[in-house]
Image (spheres, rainbow, N blue to C red):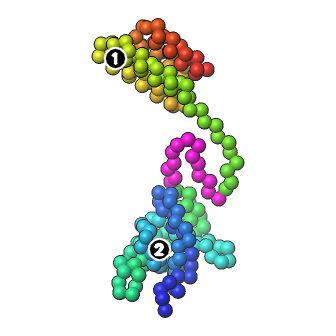
């Protein structure tokens, strides 16, 4: 009898880093779960969720993954030692999974529908004027120490703009620290006016 015939359960692995691996054929026993796959990494602390034909769901915590390599006719896979979690423990364990996302408008919807609307203001006009300030500092041929100090001021202005909630007063004060030149003053006043 092939080992695949013994894999009557379907589980998903909930990794501690938030990754979910679904539709894994397995054999779930009282304190053990057998999976005949070597293409996935299962680690101590990962959760195994089993969905049953009656609509119920069980959650197990991996105590020892028990990975073994292929041996003669036995395929590589896992013979995991697990503990079954009760409903409160399972809910708490699943809620402690951390999702790390970044970027504009990224989100995670787990078992829900997303009806939100996100508006992104990339401040491209502000970025153009910050870049123009740097070009103007280059053009002025300032002493090296003054040039470096000016770049630091412009970096601080840029950090304020990128924070999402720039303080107009802080930006204005920072811009006042730049060398006195008509072109720098006009670019600076335009940046302040864009802040609202």
From mark 1 to mark 2, how far is it between C-alphas? Answer: 63 Å
Name the residue at 49% across, 73% down.
83
In the rendered image, is residue 157 in sight?
A: no
- Disc 2 on helix, strand or loop? strand
Horizontal and vertical percent position of residue 55 = 67, 73
As for residue 189 lying within the magenta part, the answer is no
Give the residue furthest to the bottom.
Answer: 1
Instruction: Please tell me in which quadrant of the rendered image residue 112 appears.
Output: bottom right
Boundaries of the magenta span: 98-111
- In this rendering, position of residue 76 left or right of residue 54: left
As for residue 109 lying within the magenta part, the answer is yes
Horizontal and vertical percent position of residue 194 = 58, 20
Q: Camera-side residue: 119 or 109?
A: 119
Name the residue at 62% across, 57% down.
110
Where does the C terminus fall, quadrant-wise? top right
The residue that mark 1 highlights is 147
The residue that mark 2 highlights is 82
How many residues crowd around disc 2 within 10 Å: few (fewer than 14), some, or many (20 or more)?
many
- Disc 1 on helix, strand or loop? helix
Horizontal and vertical percent position of residue 113 = 68, 54
Q: Camera-side residue: 156 or 72?
A: 72
Q: Is residue 182 above or below residue 83?
A: above
Q: Camera-side residue: 1 or 64?
A: 1
- Marking on residue 2: none
Q: Nearer the viewer, mark 1 or mark 2?
A: 1
In the rendered image, is residue 148 in sight?
A: yes
Q: Is residue 121 above or below residue 58?
A: above
How many residues crowd around disc 1 within 10 Å: few (fewer than 14), some, or many (20 or more)?
some
Q: Earlier in the sequence, mark 1 or mark 2?
A: 2
Name the residue at 57% across, 46% down.
106
């Amino acid at each position: 009898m092939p080992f695949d015939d013994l894999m009557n359960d379907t589980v998903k692995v909930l990794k501690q880093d938030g990754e979910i691996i679904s539709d894994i054929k397995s054999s779930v026993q009282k304190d053990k779960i057998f999976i005949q796959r070597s293409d996935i990494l299962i680690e101590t602390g990962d959760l195994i969720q089993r969905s049953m034909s009656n609509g119920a769901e069980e959650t197990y915590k991996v105590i020892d993954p028990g990975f073994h390599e292929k041996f003669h006719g036995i395929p590589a896979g896992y013979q995991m030692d697990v503990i079954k979690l009760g409903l409160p423990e399972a809910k708490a364990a699943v809620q402690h999974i951390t999702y790390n996302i970044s970027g504009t408008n990224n989100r995670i919807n787990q078992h829900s529908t997303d009806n939100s609307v996100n508006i992104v203001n990339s401040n491209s006009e502000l970025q153009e004027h910050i870049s123009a300030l740097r070009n103007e500092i280059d053009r002025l041929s300032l002493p090296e120490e003054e040039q470096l100090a000016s770049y630091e001021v412009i970096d601080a202005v840029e950090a304020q703009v990128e924070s999402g909630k720039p303080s107009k007063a802080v930006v204005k004060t920072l811009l006042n620290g730049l060398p006195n030149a008509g072109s720098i003053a006009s670019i600076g006043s335009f940046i302040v006016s864009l802040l609202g």
